[in-house]
Structure formats: structure tokens, C-alpha cells
Image (cartoon, helix red, strand yellow):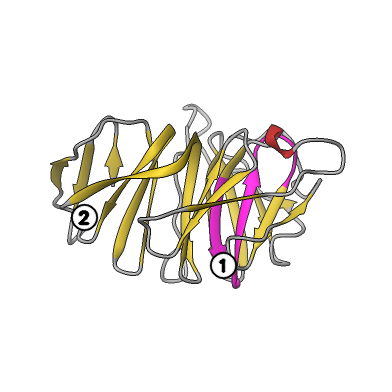
Amino acid sequence: AIADPNYVYTSENGQSWTEINVDISADWQAIAAGDNRFVAIAYNDNRINFSYDGENWTTRSLPSTNNWRDIAYGNGKFVIIAEGSNEVLYSENGLTFSSTTIPDFSGGDSTNSQWQKVVYGQGKFIAISGSDRAVASSTDGITWVRYDNALPNDDFDFAALEYGANRFLAITVDGKTTYSVDGGQTWWAGEELPSDGISSYTWTGMRYSQGV
């Protein structure tokens, strides 16, 4: 786990955690694991934090400064998406990144898209936008296909996107859900997450593991 401004927390059992200070302070957004390494990204920054063991971290530069929001690993690549930009970064080693783009939509410029979450499943990366119902997919993290008007709503503030049980599922910070069972092309509104009817919950994350 990583936290602002320069903290990393590691655990071998999920119960006892060790705090580690990293060299740079940033608005950390997400961390991904793959190929026996960790990569952490920050908002409005051009640096990543990289580690093989979660304890010793190295700072590396990205090709550009952007509002990086999420990172995913799959098919031998790390993929990073940005909010308010069509730029996507990809890397096979998590150290050196290259830049590509999500296509514009037919009515204008996809830099208006608020790409918020990305995940890997069913042999592809899926990215979702919180502002314009857009979804993008890529099998290799380099060449992207855009699906306009795919999401059921155009005003989402996504907290998480996961793949499991042959479907993609996204949740918002206020408990709305949307899911896809056709590889991310078509999305349906799901049930809202339960609450006690008194408190107002703010959802911050979601993970799929061992069938749940």
C-alpha cells in the first residue's frame, strides 16, 4: 500500500504492517504488481516509484507530466491512464515507459474524457471514463479501441474497477455499480451498494479474489 506524501506499507499476512519512507513526496494514486515488481503512480507528476520487494524503492521519470489516475498489469505490460487526457503509458519492465493514445470520439477530442480506472481481464485492458460514458479497450496496451456511450451514465466518480467471474465490475464513491459481461463493450447499471440507511458511505476500493 502507498500513501501521501511518501509512505509505503508492507505486510506478509495482511495484519501486521511495516511503514517505509520513500525518497519523493507526491499525490500517489495507485500501485500495481506484476512480473515480481511494484510500480506506483502519482497525480500531476512525471515520476513513478519502482520496487522489486516493496521495501527498497527507486524513482524513475515518465515521458510526460499528466494527471495519472490508475495503473494495471497484464499481458506482460504495465499500463497507466490519465484523467483529462488521451495519453496512455505502457512498459514491459515497469522502469521505462512509452506513450500512446486512446482514439478521439466522433464528436470531438477524447482529452475531455476523465479516464479514471483501468484493469486487465479476458485478455485485454479496459479503461473507463467518469465524464462521457466512454470505455476503451486494448489487447496489448498500445493500440486502443474506443466505445462511445458504453456506460449507463456520464457522471461517475469511480472508486474501483475489477475483473472476476467473467465480468468487469466498477463501483463509484457513492456506491453505484455498473458491469459488463461482453468484454467491456456494453455496460449495465447494477444494484447500489448496501448502507445502513443512516450513514453516508464513501467507497474507496474493491478487489476480486478466490471467487468473491
Residue named by callout 1: 121
Pick whichever, 163 or 74, lies toward us: 74
- Secondary structure of residue under mark 1: strand
| Label 1 Cα neighbours within 10 Å, binned few <14 / some 14-19 / many ≥20 | some
123 in relation to 190, above or below: below
- Secondary structure of residue under mark 2: loop
**Amino acid tagged 2:** Gly
Residue 193 at what x, y percent from top left?
Answer: 56, 44
Residue 15 at what x, y percent from top left?
Answer: 18, 53
Find the residue positioned furthest to the right.
107
Q: Main secondary structure of the magenta part?
A: strand
Question: Which mark, by number, is residue 54?
Answer: 2
Task: State the image quarter where residue 44 is shown.
Answer: top left
**Amino acid tagged 1:** Gly
Task: State the image quarter where residue 93 is shown.
Answer: bottom left
Q: How many tags in the picture?
A: 2
70 in relation to 65, above or below: below
User: What stretch of residues is rendered in magenta?
Assistant: 117-134
Residue 86 at what x, y percent from top left?
Answer: 65, 42
Please tell me which residue is depicted at 29% across the width and 62% down the height of the picture. Answer: 37
Please tell me which residue is depicted at 37% across the width and 31% down the height of the picture. Answer: 27
| Label 2 Cα neighbours within 10 Å, binned few <14 / some 14-19 / many ≥20 | some
| Image position of 87 (left or right of 6) | right
| Image position of 173 (left or right of 53) | right
Is residue 82 found inside the magenta-colored segment of the image? no
Task: State the image quarter where residue 121 is shown.
Answer: bottom right
Tell whether label 2 touches label 1 (CB within 8 Å).
Answer: no
